[in-house]
Image (cartoon, helix red, strand yellow):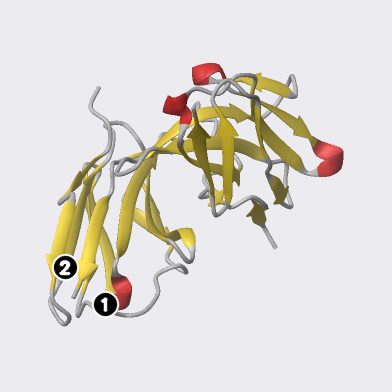
Amino acid sequence: DAGVIQSPRHEVTEMGQEVTLRCKPISGHDYLFWYRQTMMRGLELLIYFNNNVPIDDSGMPEDRFSAKMPNASFSTLKIQPSEPRDSAVYFCASRPDRGSSGELFFGEGSRLTVL
Amino acid sequence: AQSVTQPDIHITVSEGASLELRCNYSYGATPYLFWYVQSPGQGLQLLLKYFSGDTLVQGIKGFEAEFKRSQSSFNLRKPSVHWSDAAEYFCAVGNQAGTALIFGKGTTLSVSS
């Protein structure tokens, strides 16, 4: 089975530009999570969905960040406008609902650099 | 507050020597505990997990971890480290009830020859 797929793997953009990160979870997984990884703050949860519905977005840093999950196989994380402090690796993860021991399955991440 | 503490930011171990990475957690409910490993430029891979039963759990790549409820700890061990174990290691806590995992800030392991 394919794992969690994220795109792009690397993104370099200029301050003020819109950035869209994409994620395809593992088929059949009911939960999808977006995390951000930085040297200073480690892995932070931004938002997570259950059955395409946002459950907890308290980790979204500010209104410049938005996330959607229009269907069970696709999610986006958008930053508009981007700022240099948004530079980080953004991870998407998924997990099933039933029969789960809570383990998350991670994608390889999207490394964002905002100049 | 729910949290995970990994006291060691960076550890260097000689190849062939034993390894112990520390993890302490604070969690209100019965914890599910995890260790993940991250190689440079890669995502996180699960090493092992604990949610019930035997408090000593075995994982992949020869790693094991012991859950000690009285100490709120879940330390990761390996009897003999290989150069390929050099990576960043994350401890995480959660539960089955659909919540997200809370991660520690990670420990970077370097292996010297």
Residue at 40% in and 74% down: A61
Q: Position of residue A8 (x, y in %)?
A: 15, 51
Asked if marks 2 and 1 fall on the same chain, the answer is yes
- Residue that mark 1 sits on: A84
Q: Is residue A106 left or right of residue B1?
A: left
Q: Is residue A77 visible?
A: no
- For label 1, the SS is helix
Amino acid type, label 2: Val
- Foreground label between 2 and 1: 1
Between B49 and B89, which is closer to the camera in this rendering?
B89
Between B88 and A91, which is closer to the camera in this rendering?
B88
Q: Is residue B72 visible?
A: yes
Label placed on residue B25 = none
Quarter where residue B55 is shown: top right
- Residue that mark 2 sits on: A19
Q: Where is residue A79 in the image (x, y as percent from the top left)?
A: 23, 71
Q: Is residue B50 above or below residue A58?
A: above
State which chain disc 1 sits on.
Answer: A
- For label 2, the SS is strand
Q: Of marks 2 and 1, which one's residue comes earlier in the chain?
A: 2
Task: Give the Cα separation between the discs numbered 2 and 1.
Answer: 12 Å
Q: Position of residue B7 (x, y in %)?
A: 67, 52
Q: How crowded is mark 2: few (under 14 residues within 10 Å), some or many (20 or more)?
A: some
Residue at 37% in and 79% down: A62
Residue at 16% in and 82% down: A16
Q: How crowded is mark 1: few (under 14 residues within 10 Å), some or many (20 or more)?
A: some
